[in-house]
Image (cartoon, rainbow, N blue to C red):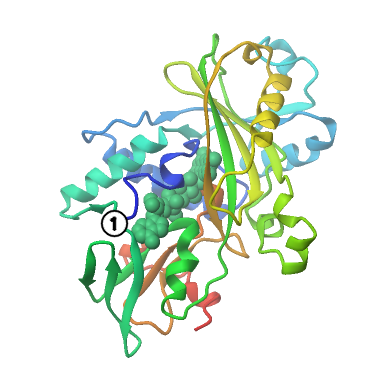
Amino acid sequence: MVDGGGIGAGASGRNGGFLFRQPLGWINDLLAETLEIYEEVSDGPVPFDLAPWPMLVLAVEEDELEAAQAYAEAVGGEEVDLRADPWFADDLAGAFVVDGGRTLDAMGATTALAQAARREGVEFRLGSEAKRILVRGERVTGLATDEGVLPCERVVLATGPWLRLLLRSVGVDLPFTSSRGWLLETGPVDPPPRYAIEQALWPMQDEMAGIVGAPTVQEVADGAAEDPGIVSLLLGARPDGRCLIGTSLRRSLLDDPEGPETVRRLADRAARVSPALVDVPVVAAWSGRRAHTPDGLPVVGPVPGVEGLVVAGGFSSIGMVTAPAACRRLAAGDTSLFDPGRFAAH
Ligand SMILES: Cc1cc2nc3c(=O)[nH]c(=O)nc-3n(C[C@H](O)[C@H](O)[C@H](O)COP(=O)(O)OP(=O)(O)OC[C@H]3O[C@@H](n4cnc5c(N)ncnc54)[C@H](O)[C@@H]3O)c2cc1C
């Protein structure tokens, strides 16, 4: 395993770690399989705080209520009256509790999975960036890296938002685009929230490409790169009472994070929802980049036209829910749902 950074250098080490049921059935199928994988590794040497946590689908304003109701209906959520709960502002439009959610510490889980792979004999070459996939006669022969050429017959490309760069080195283009999302971490919140909260502004998986698809040159010239994107509250407590406050969805053409505006909008939304959060210190803020596909489904499987080249990516905002199961399916030879062939242009 070659990674230009360390374990969890990309979004996998810096996400919210929320595992929620969703209106789309294929996501829930993967969630069930992924939970089995997390359970398997949770008794290993690296803890990652996997815990059941009820999800609250929240309509902050009246115009979010319809989306919240539809989400709750699709996943069997129950309406709850938040006015009786002093943790919440008393003028929120509505909320629904959905059971079956989990949270985990993202960096812990990613490190635990890497440790499980090491136990199975995987060798890690960290801090070594892959520069080109090497092919001869449309067949993979190796990988050129910082450390030199690694001869091999198979490359599984899982470089998140950077997928398109290495694919180009073998003349393949897959239509991945990228978004950036932010998280804030607070000091301990007393009392901590009882729910992991998802505001009903977050788009459904099949709507994302419309928001983060590649803009044209004219659209960039007209300011598309400055489009502020969406801020939709995603908030949950960690076992020690700290809270994570997310998140945002903004098209990302740039490796560099945008300015502090998104962080301000997130804090503003959190203070709007809960008086318990207003005076809590914010101790950190960071962002990560996600990879998206035009149909919202991941791309996991062999790349047509290049023997030995496999891709696993496009996990969007639900990679902690879907990637472990999708990759286990890949290892078992089942790539039916996420076949790269649906997009491949070689
Ligand atoms: C703010 C935020 C919150 C999120 N919250 C959640 C959540 O609550 N639940 C959920 O399910 N999902 C969440 N996600 C989404 C989830 O984090 C991603 O879908 C998932 O981590 C993607 O995993 P990946 O392995 O495809 O990519 P990444 O984790 O980005 O990994 C890509 C790796 O490739 C390496 N790399 C790139 N180029 C090269 C190269 N040339 N050579 C060598 N190595 C290279 C990078 O160093 C990196 O380690 C969130 C994402 C963000 C940004």
Residue at the spot x=76%, y=28% of the render?
A: 60
**Looking at the picture, which amino acid does disc 1 mark?**
Ser
User: Residue at label 1?
Assistant: 128
Residue at the spot x=29%, y=45% of the render?
A: 113
* Residue 86 against residue 156 in the figure, above or below: above
Q: Would residue 334 appear left or right of 62 to someone viewing this image?
A: left
* Residue 145 against residue 101 in the figure, above or below: below
Quick one: SS at disc 1?
loop
Residue at the spot x=46%, y=56% of the render?
A: 160
Residue at the spot x=57%, y=44% of the render?
A: 257
* Residue 266 against residue 40 in the figure, above or below: above
Q: Does the residue tagged 1 have its C-beta within 8 Å of any atom of ligand 1?
A: yes
- Position in image of residue 50 (x %, y %): 38, 31
- Position in image of residue 230 (x %, y %): 71, 43
Q: Would residue 252 appear left or right of 170 to someone viewing this image?
A: right
At label 1, counting other C-alpha atoms closer than 10 Å, the crowd grade (few under 14, some 14-19, many 20 or more) is some
